[in-house]
Amino acid sequence: MSEKETLTAGSLLVHRNTIVTQLPQLDLPPHLMEHYHIIRKRFANPIVEMRNGTCLGCFMVLSSHNQQKIKSGEYDMCETCGRILYYEGY
Ligand SMILES: [Zn+2]
């Protein structure tokens, strides 16, 4: 089946996303900063962009509540994978 192809595509995307992780300065609220230290051990890319309402870490569509919050310029956690999301205007 196409399981192998899916895995390859997934790892390529994850790889590409690691470039985005290096933010110049983290201005996270305390509860997210704490969360960040936990998830950065789990993910190579603990902070990812939200694009088209989708988490670029796990590629799940975020709830509209979550999307609104992130679009307003706040950082928020992905409800699916727990990565911290930010918004670049896409
Ligand atoms: Zn996610």
Image (spheres, helix red, strand yellow):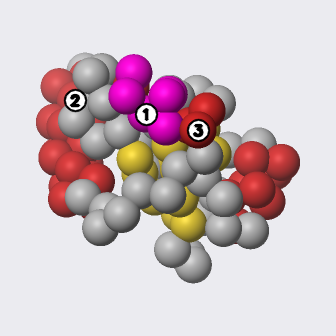
Which quarter of the figure has residue 90?
A: bottom right
Residue carrying label 2: 7
Residue 70: image location, x then y, percent? 67, 58
Give the residue type at disc 1.
Tyr
Q: Compared to 50, does 71 lie above or below? A: below
State which tag comes first along the sequence, 2 or 3: 2
Residue 25: image location, x then y, percent? 36, 63
Q: Compared to 6, does 41 lie above or below? A: above
Part of the protein shown in magenta = 33-38
State which tag comes first along the sequence, 1 or 3: 3
Instruction: Note whether ligand 1 is within 8 Å of mark 1.
Output: no
Q: Along the line of sight, which residue is nearer the eye, 84 or 61?
A: 84
Q: Is residue 60 left or right of residue 9?
A: right
- Residue at the spot 49% in from the left edge and 28% down from the top edge: 34
- Residue at the spot 83% in from the left edge and 48% down from the top edge: 65
Residue carrying label 1: 36
